[in-house]
Image: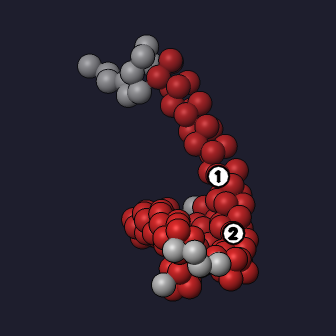
Amino acid sequence: MIDITVLELQSIAAELKKSIVLDINDVKKANHESLVERNSIKLTLMDSLSELKQKLNSELSVEYKNGKDISIYKDSIDELEVQLRELYELNGKLASIVLPVKEMYKDIIDDITKKNGGSLIEVMA
């Protein structure tokens, strides 16, 4: 059971990594449509990742309480940890690209709003 849960977690982590790599490429190409389309899929994958992580912790706890040597899962859990770290690093790379763009747009909007007396759109009557 634990092995299956670890494999499911590894599979989801791999899918998320692929999605983030695609996101990075689409951000560079300003391909916003693909980014939006993938977003809901990524949210579902992240929810599944979180649920499976809790399931894995529970399964390991039960095995430990039943006196089973859980060190037999060490290698597969270590590999999962490596994949999750890679996912974290890729996500950080995506954020480092997206956040400056977000801040630039915020600055532009703030500047326009300031010039228009507190309104983003100036209406001429």
Q: Is residue 90 left or right of residue 40?
A: right
Location of residue 41 in the rendering, given as x and y in whole percent from the top left corner:
42, 70
Helix, strand or loop status at disc 1: helix
- Which residue is depicted at the point 59% across and 78% down? 68
**Which residue corresponds to mark 2?**
81
Between discs 1 and 2, the one toward the N terminus: 2
**Which residue corresponds to mark 1?**
95
The one nearer the camera, 114 or 73, is: 73
Location of residue 29 in the rendering, given as x and y in whole percent from the top left corner:
62, 66
Q: Amino acid at mark 1?
A: Ala
Q: Residue furthest top?
A: 117
For the question of whether residue 77 can be seen, the reply is yes
- Which residue is depicted at the point 59% across and 30% down? 107
Can you tell which of label 1 and label 2 is closer to the viewer?
Answer: 2
Location of residue 63 in the rendering, given as x and y in whole percent from the top left corner:
53, 75
- Which residue is depicted at the point 65% across and 67% down? 84
Q: Is residue 1 left or right of residue 100?
A: left
